[in-house]
Structures are given as C-alpha cells and as structure tokens.
Amino acid sequence: MAFVLGALLASLAAWVGPLLDPPALARWTVQTHEENDFRAAYALIAIRHLPMFLLAVAAGRLIFLVLEKPSMRMVAAVTLPWLLYVVVTGVLESVAIGEKPFEWMVYQPAYFIWPHFIAIPAGLYAASRMANRRK
C-alpha cells in the first residue's frame, strides 16, 4: 500500500515539477547574469524545490494518516517510486542527447540535480515525524 501511495505522490510531483521549471530557470538566469552564483543557487532551490518539499509534507500527512504507523521503513517505501522516477528520467534524458547514462549525476552546478533527490524524501520524513508526534 505504501508503494502505491508513493507512486501516486511521484505522479503528482512529476506533473507539478515541470510547471515550476520556467520561473525557476528564469530567476536562476537573472542571478547568473548578475554573476551572483550563490543567489542563483538559492533562487533555483527556493522556486523549484521548496514547493516540492511542501507538496511532500502535505501529501505525506495524508499518506501517514492512512497508513497509521509511520516509520523509516514506511518513508523509504513511499519515497522509492519518486527516486526511481528521478533516476529513470535522468538516464533516459542523458541517453537521448547522446551522453553516458549517468552523466547527468555529475552536472555542474550540482544544485541542478541533487535537490531532486532530497526534497521529496525530506518532506515525507518531516510528515512522518509530524504524524508520530500526533500519536
């Protein structure tokens, strides 16, 4: 059941994520043209990944309400579909443009890639902690 709910969350995040890309990249472009890479990183993370984190917290609260006993194992089971989606999408996009399959994992700057792995799992972990506190 946790994997299925995680797949639903991954589907929702995969639908919402591309909607956040244009404003995030626009802000990042402005900051890099001003040669302020630190602010560019924070702009990209705040506009693209913070809403994904908050989506994971909200969805996680609902998921852990249904699943009753949140644990780290449960968080991992709910997170797994999202991580699979990120890896498969990254590999397919790399291969489509003629790169090695895992070339996308070493893109620079790293703040383009690694928050994808952190935002949803961190949001689900926060939601599980909230659910555990409630009980």
Image (cartoon, helix red, strand yellow):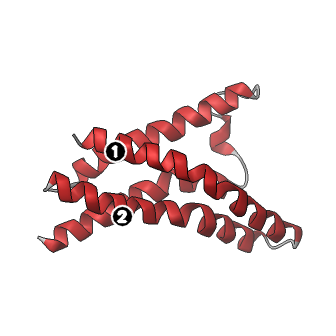
- The residue singled out by tag 1 in the image is 6
Residue found 68% across the figure and 35% down from its top: 103
Could you tell me which residue is drawn at 81 percent across and 73 percent down?
36
Establish if 26 lies above or below 7: below
Q: Position of residue 28 (x, y in %)?
A: 76, 65
Q: Quick check: marks 1 and 2 in contact, CB under 8 Å?
A: no
Q: Residue at x 18, y 73 (%)?
A: 133
Q: Quadrant of the C terminus?
A: bottom left
Q: Position of residue 30 (x, y in %)?
A: 83, 69
Mark 1: give few (<14), some (14-19) or many (20+) Cα within 10 Å: many
Residue 59 visible to the viewer: yes
Residue at the image position 88 percent from the left and 68 percent from the top: 33
Ranked by sequence position, the earlier of labels 1 and 2 is 1
Residue 3 is left or right of residue 27, and the answer is left
Q: Which mark is residue 58?
A: 2
Q: Quadrant of the N terminus?
A: top left
Percent from the top left, x then y, of residue 78? 31, 46
Where residue 92 appears, as percent x and y from the top left, is 62, 28
Q: Amino acid at mark 2?
A: Ala
Using a 10 Å C-alpha cutoff, classify the residue at mark 2 as few (fewer than 14 neighbours), some (14 to 19) or many (20 or more).
some
**SS class, disc 2:** helix
Indicate which disc residue 86 carries: none
For marks 1 and 2, give the CA distance: 13 Å
Residue kind at label 1, given as amino acid type: Gly
